């Protein structure tokens, strides 16, 4: 009995479908590319349930002749190439003749098509690759293809499909890619009866970027147009302060075709070299035009990867185009000037949180009873320059004085000077601000009432010190007792310099603050981590980022976010983690989406990645000016906590130089 035999056509089509049709997004790509090749000026894509149960692509192209309709569904049927020489200069998006045959073998298909020279159109219906209906019908010039019940006859493939919102995101990403690469065509995407986006078809790439990516992105892009040898490069790149956690926003096009290329990615990132923080990736929409004979597009089943005949020339052209656009941008020049002046944690601008520390409970400061007397004054648990208005909560603001009675002069707030008095000769004050008036220094209460002056204490009567708090049984003692640490200042507004009796501590305030916030977020439940926004805030993301966020909505809720679909490429944020500024929501959600796309693992690991992103953005940034009182309290908090030695990403938070090392450095000891 022979062991080698030829597969029947249906089996061959199913195998081909496995290469071409991976999900609804793959079907949308093949059908939309056919519409572009047909010379369409308007293309409408409609999906339901992520495109699994219903996907329709309508175009106003030239249509298919009646005698060619049945042939179009045969395998390897194409109108794009006729001779082997045609493969050397392919100028169309499709050419293999596998799309319709592969799609029809795993779905229920209806096609309506008419050419300009015919008064009647043709309708053909197929189910699982077999024709079930054919006849004349009325329809406009062009072609409409309706796909229903994808993988209805291949349940093994259907079980690998993701949630409807995720599959819908893949479809939207495909249509977006083609819409930007073909700006002269007006594209429209409808998801579950609601328009997701539409492009004007005015021939301008920036208009398509605006329609698909939003005005915030389109308004910041840098244009470029460079002709180098046989390569013409045009398009847009984002300034260095607009980055992503993954490369999913790097869009490359070759002669109107969406492609993936490690060569182009490497050239792009080489052009940004020295301008981006490690782990951040640029955003671009770059279109390369070159002679079709200089590139081979027939190296990938889905035609996504290409091979260049002269790779070095292409790499050099992309690199110089990107570098020139960045060098010529005034905004980039200003960023480079700031970079040379001081280190930065990232290239982003916007509001940031100041230091937020665990409670520090030093000795109470007594005061005389007044109208609002109620006890001793203690330091606030957090200090914050920016106020976040949250429903049901009280904003955290530095203490302020109320209006003084008419009989007393109005006090003025002054920040305390850095106190270098040795710890044994002074009484540490827990009050971050003091008041001064013509009657001399005074202490003041949180309610703002000014008590009478307290009698000065003499050297014979040192101030009483509060008894230290009892430590929990079995807990290790802290690394350094708070009274032993004295902040001397900070270097480059980045590294806190603190002294104890044995040496010097250097603290990276961003890394330490990030670790502090990360630990606190991990200890909180979803209800504790989230704060309801007073006014829900819309956030614009890319279609793929939005789909990922909606797919992991439950995970985001555990991290403190409450989101919902807001149409097009937007999400409505109703709650956010308590340490995060509202102005940072877009960046953080985009960053989280990138991490979720690249990370695959248990839910607890994904949740940790989310919390790392929130903590990193909420932490104070290197180069930001911090009040001395905040530095003092923060340094004590860090050095009292054994866990604050490395940030969530593993980078050191503190470094120690002993007194012996210093004396050895200056040859005081051998």
Image: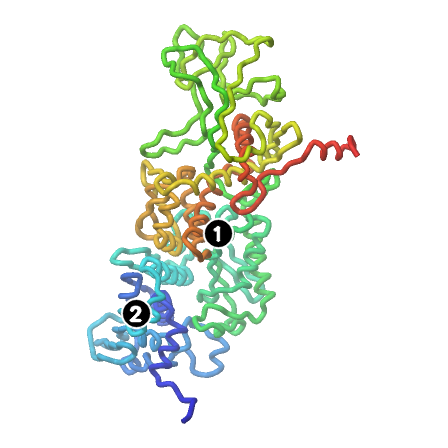
In the rendered image, the vertical position of residue 162 relative to residue 563, given as above or below: below
Q: Helix, strand, or loop for circle 2?
A: loop
Name the residue rendered at 36%, 33% in the picture: 389
In this view of the protein, which residue sits in the foreground, 585 or 218? 585
Q: Helix, strand, or loop for circle 1?
A: loop
For the residue carrying disc 1, how many other residues have a C-alpha within 10 Å: few (<14), some (14-19), or many (20+)? many
Is any atom of residue 257 visible in this view?
Answer: yes
For the residue carrying disc 2, how many other residues have a C-alpha within 10 Å: few (<14), some (14-19), or many (20+)? many
Residue identified by numbered label 1 = 245
The answer to whether residue 422 is left or right of residue 7 is: right
Q: Position of residue 64 (x, y in %)?
A: 30, 77
Name the residue rendered at 46%, 14% in the picture: 366
Image quadrant in which the N terminus is located: bottom left
Q: Position of residue 321 (x, y in %)?
A: 56, 57
In this view of the protein, which residue sits in the foreground, 118 or 512? 512
Of the residues under marks 2 and 1, which one precedes in the sequence? 2
In the rendered image, the vertical position of residue 338 relative to residue 122, given as above or below: above
In this view of the protein, which residue sits in the foreground, 324 or 248? 248
Image quadrant in which the C terminus is located: top right
Residue identified by numbered label 2 = 150
Name the residue rendered at 47%, 33% in the picture: 356
The answer to whether residue 598 is left or right of residue 324 is: left
Cα–Cα gap, marks 2 and 1: 33 Å
């Amino acid at each position: 009995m022979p062991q080698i035999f030829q597969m029947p056509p249906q089996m061959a089509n199913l195998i081909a479908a496995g290469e071409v049709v991976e999900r609804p997004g793959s079907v949308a790509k093949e059908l939309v590319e056919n519409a572009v090749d047909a010379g369409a000026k308007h293309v409408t894509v409609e999906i339901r349930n992520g495109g699994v149960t219903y996907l329709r692509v309508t175009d106003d192209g030239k249509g298919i002749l009646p005698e060619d309709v049945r042939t179009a569904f045969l395998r390897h049927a194409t109108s794009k190439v006729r001779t082997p020489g045609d493969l050397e200069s392919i100028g169309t998006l499709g050419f293999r003749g596998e799309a319709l045959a592969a799609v029809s073998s795993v779905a229920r298909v209806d096609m309506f098509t008419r050419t300009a020279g015919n008064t009647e159109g043709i309708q053909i219906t197929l189910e699982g690759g077999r024709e079930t209906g054919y006849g004349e019908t009325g329809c406009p010039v062009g072609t409409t293809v309706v796909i229903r019940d994808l993988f209805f006859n291949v349940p093994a493939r259907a079980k690998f499909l993701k949630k409807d919102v995720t599959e819908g995101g893949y479809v939207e990403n495909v249509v977006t890619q083609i819409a930007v690469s073909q700006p002269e065509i007006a594209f429209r995407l409808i998801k579950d009866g609601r328009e997701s986006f539409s492009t004007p078809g005015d021939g301008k790439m920036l208009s398509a970027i605006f329609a698909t990516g939003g005005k915030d992105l389109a308004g910041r892009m840098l244009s470029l147009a460079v002709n180098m040898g046989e390569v013409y490069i045009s398009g847009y790149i984002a300034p260095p302060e607009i980055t992503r956690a993954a490369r999913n926003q790097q869009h490359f096009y070759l002669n109107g075709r969406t492609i993936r290329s490690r060569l182009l990615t490497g050239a792009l990132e080489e052009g940004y070299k020295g301008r981006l923080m490690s782990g951040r990736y640029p955003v671009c929409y770059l279109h390369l035009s070159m002679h079709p004979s200089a590139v081979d597009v027939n190296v990938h089943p889905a035609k996504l990867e290409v091979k260049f005949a002269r790779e070095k020339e292409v790499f050099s052209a992309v690199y110089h185009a990107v570098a020139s656009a960045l060098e010529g941008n005034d905004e980039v020049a200003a960023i480079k000037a700031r970079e040379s002046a001081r280190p930065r944690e990232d290239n982003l601008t916007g509001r940031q949180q100041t230091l937020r520390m665990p409670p520090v409970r030093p000795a109470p400061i007594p005061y005389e009873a007044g109208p609002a007397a109620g006890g001793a004054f203690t330091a606030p648990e957090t200090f914050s320059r920016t106020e976040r208005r949250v429903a049901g909560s009280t904003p955290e603001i530095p203490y302020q004085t109320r209006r003084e009675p008419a009989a007393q002069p109005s006090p003025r707030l002054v920040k305390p000077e850095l106190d270098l008095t040795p710890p044994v000769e002074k009484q540490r004050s827990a009050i971050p601000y003091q008041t001064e008036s013509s009657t001399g220094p005074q202490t003041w209460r949180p309610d703002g009432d000014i008590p009478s002056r307290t009698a000065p204490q003499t050297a014979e009567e040192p101030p009483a010190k509060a008894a230290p708090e009892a430590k929990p049984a079995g807990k290790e003692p802290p690394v350094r007792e708070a009274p032993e640490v004295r902040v001397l200042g900070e270097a480059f507004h980045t590294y806190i310099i603190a002294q104890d009796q044995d040496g010097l501590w250097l603290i990276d305030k961003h890394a330490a603050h990030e670790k502090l916030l990360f630990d606190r977020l991990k200890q909180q439940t979803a209800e504790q981590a989230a704060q309801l926004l007073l006014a829900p805030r819309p956030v614009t993301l890319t279609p793929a980022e939005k789909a990922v966020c909606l797919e992991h909505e439950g995970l985001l809720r555990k991290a403190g976010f409450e989101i919902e679909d807001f149409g097009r490429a937007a999400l409505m944020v109703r709650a956010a983690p308590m340490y995060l500024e509202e102005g940072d929501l877009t960046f953080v959600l985009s960053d989280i989406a990138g991490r979720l796309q690249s990370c695959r693992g248990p839910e607890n690991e994904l949740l940790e990645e989310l919390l790392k992103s929130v903590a990193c953005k909420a932490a104070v940034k290197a180069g930001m000016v911090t009040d001395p009182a905040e530095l003092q309290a923060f340094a004590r908090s860090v050095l009292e906590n054994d866990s604050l030695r490395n940030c969530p990403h593993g980078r050191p938070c503190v470094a120690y130089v002993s007194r012996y090392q210093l004396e050895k450095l200056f040859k005081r000891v051998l």
